[in-house]
Image: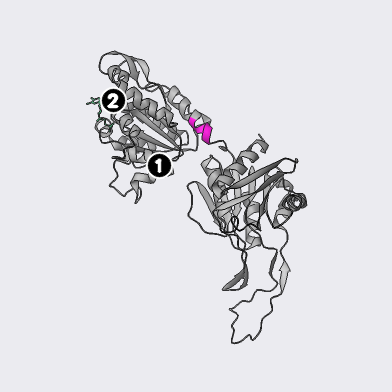
């Protein structure tokens, strides 16, 4: 494999790739690969077993990737929780070279070094590329461990036959970079079906100020919007979340905090240029105080108070009338307490949307503030999909499954 100029496939560009290196002679070949991936626009982070560091020094990988290498679990340089940091961060994991030893440790669920701990904490597809002496590779113990890994959904890149470092000829050489990259693309494609797409999501209830310390808002928690943003990001999309709500942030999401409907609209107008998809999960208010008090309204000075409210211009409908946003597939959300389908279809038409998710807010077990949701997804082309009760994250993935085929190629 060394130094062959295999081009990095476009599908890998921009992904966060963790490269886990174990202690085989072929470790030196992975330096080239880590370098090529970095140059092609991947974010590459490397972790090494103690044995791997006997073959290649961490500064070499740090040099070619531009990022510090994780060499153990007990240094908090990269994160206060190094054992789960990379697994959480990565969108794709390559273990190469994978020694007989590390394959055995992965198969038995160990987490006694940074490489195996990362794999136990992984959330992304994993590709394992074994490399070892031919006799080691042929052993039943190794083959059975490899079978275990395959059964668990890990992609194995079979080693090649040829000259081995031990002087023997046989199967055990690390596969070439083309085979490694091919396996990485396949593993990534199964998960990153939104790669190359720009998705804008809104979340939370808008807040309209009464005075400098008070606002009127609604019960929307923003959880559905955060779930949609996380699901789209996990599937490879470039995601911007325009939100009034605060929740723990997910890797790879650009968050824009806003309060009022007007701020949300301004932010959306700039974020939506060139976007593929808008998911309007925010609950935008219908009314706001007609007058904003410039200082705190005090009970002592105000024996009784009437709030005059003025309608908020329809944010979603105004986006529909902007010809520059024609290419953006727009999905709205409707919270209804009766006649779900009919009201949602009417809203979809009135607001110029291509799709709408209707939630039944009369149900106590789902919706506002809950971890669960259910509803129906309707498209302007007349298609209809029931969304059974599920966690908001599961529902987000189901919505994306149905929307994806409708996006412009
Ligand atoms: C010079 C040398 C080369 C080695 N090459 C390999 C190899 O290619 N594949 C392998 O499975 N083990 C190889 N080993 C053995 C591993 O380094 C050893 O099993 C180690 O415990 C692996 O630890 P790790 O899996 O945590 O990295 C080699 C050992 C030495 C001393």
Judge: label 1 CB < 8 Å from ligand 1: no
- From where the camera sits, is residue 273 visible? no
Q: Quadrant of residue 138?
A: top left
| Label 2 vs label 1, nearer the camera | 1
Q: Secondary structure at mark 2?
A: loop
Residue at 56%, 52% in the rendered image? 372
Judge: label 2 CB < 8 Å from ligand 1: yes
Q: Quadrant of residue 114?
A: top left
Q: Tell me where the magenta segment starts and ends, as one range.
A: 187-193
Q: Residue furthest top?
A: 169
Q: Earlier in the sequence, mark 2 or mark 1?
A: 2
Residue 353, given in percent of the width and then of the height, sits at: 72, 48
Q: Is residue 73 above or below residue 19?
A: below
Q: Which residue, given by chain and number where applicable, does mark 2 sit on?
A: 25
Q: Is residue 185 above or below residue 327?
A: above
Residue 12, given in percent of the width and then of the height, sits at: 49, 33
The dot on residue 87 is 1
Main secondary structure found in the magenta portion: helix
């Amino acid at each position: 494999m060394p130094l062959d100029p295999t081009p990095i496939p476009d599908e890998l560009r921009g992904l966060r790739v963790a490269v886990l290196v174990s202690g085989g002679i072929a470790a030196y070949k992975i330096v080239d690969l880590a370098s090529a991936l970095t140059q092609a626009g991947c974010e590459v982070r490397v972790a090494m077993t103690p044995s791997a560091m006997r073959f290649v020094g961490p500064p070499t990988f740090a040099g070619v990737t531009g990022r510090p290498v994780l060499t153990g679990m007990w240094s908090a340089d990269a994160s206060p929780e190094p054992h789960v940091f990379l697994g959480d961060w990565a969108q794709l994991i390559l273990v190469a070279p994978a020694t007989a030893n590390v394959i055995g440790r992965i198969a038995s669920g160990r987490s006694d070094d940074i490489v195996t701990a990362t794999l136990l904490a992984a959330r992304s597809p994993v590709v394992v590329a074994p490399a070892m002496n031919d006799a080691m590779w042929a052993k039943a113990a190794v083959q059975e461990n490899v079978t275990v890994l395959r059964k668990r959904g890990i992609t194995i890149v079979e080693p090649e036959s040829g000259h081995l470092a031990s002087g023997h000829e046989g199967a055990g050489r690390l596969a070439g970079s083309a085979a490694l990259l091919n396996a990485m693309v396949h593993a990534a494609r199964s998960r990153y079906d939104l790669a190359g797409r720009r998705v804008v999501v809104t979340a939370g209830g808008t807040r309209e100020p009464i005075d400098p310390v008070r606002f009127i808002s609604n019960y929307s928690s923003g959880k559905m919007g955060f779930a949609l943003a996380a699901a789209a990001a996990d599937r490879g999309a470039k995601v911007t979340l325009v939100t009034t709500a605060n929740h723990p942030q997910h890797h790879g999401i650009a968050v824009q905090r806003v309060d009022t409907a007007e701020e949300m609209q301004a932010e959306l107008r700039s974020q939506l240029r060139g976007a593929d998809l808008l998911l309007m999960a925010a609950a935008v208010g219908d009314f706001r105080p007609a007058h904003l008090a410039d200082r705190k309204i005090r009970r002592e000075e105000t024996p009784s108070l009437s709030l005059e409210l003025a309608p908020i211009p329809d944010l979603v409908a105004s986006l529909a009338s902007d010809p520059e946003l024609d290419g953006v597939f727009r999905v709205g959300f409707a919270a209804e307490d009766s006649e779900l389908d009919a009201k949602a279809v009417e809203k979809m038409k009135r607001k110029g949307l291509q799709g709408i998710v209707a939630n039944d807010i009369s149900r106590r077990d789902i919706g506002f503030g809950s971890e669960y949701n259910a509803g129906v997804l309707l498209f302007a082309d007349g298609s209809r999909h029931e969304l059974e009760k599920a966690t908001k994250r599961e529902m987000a993935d189901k919505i994306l499954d149905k929307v994806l085929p409708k996006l412009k190629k």
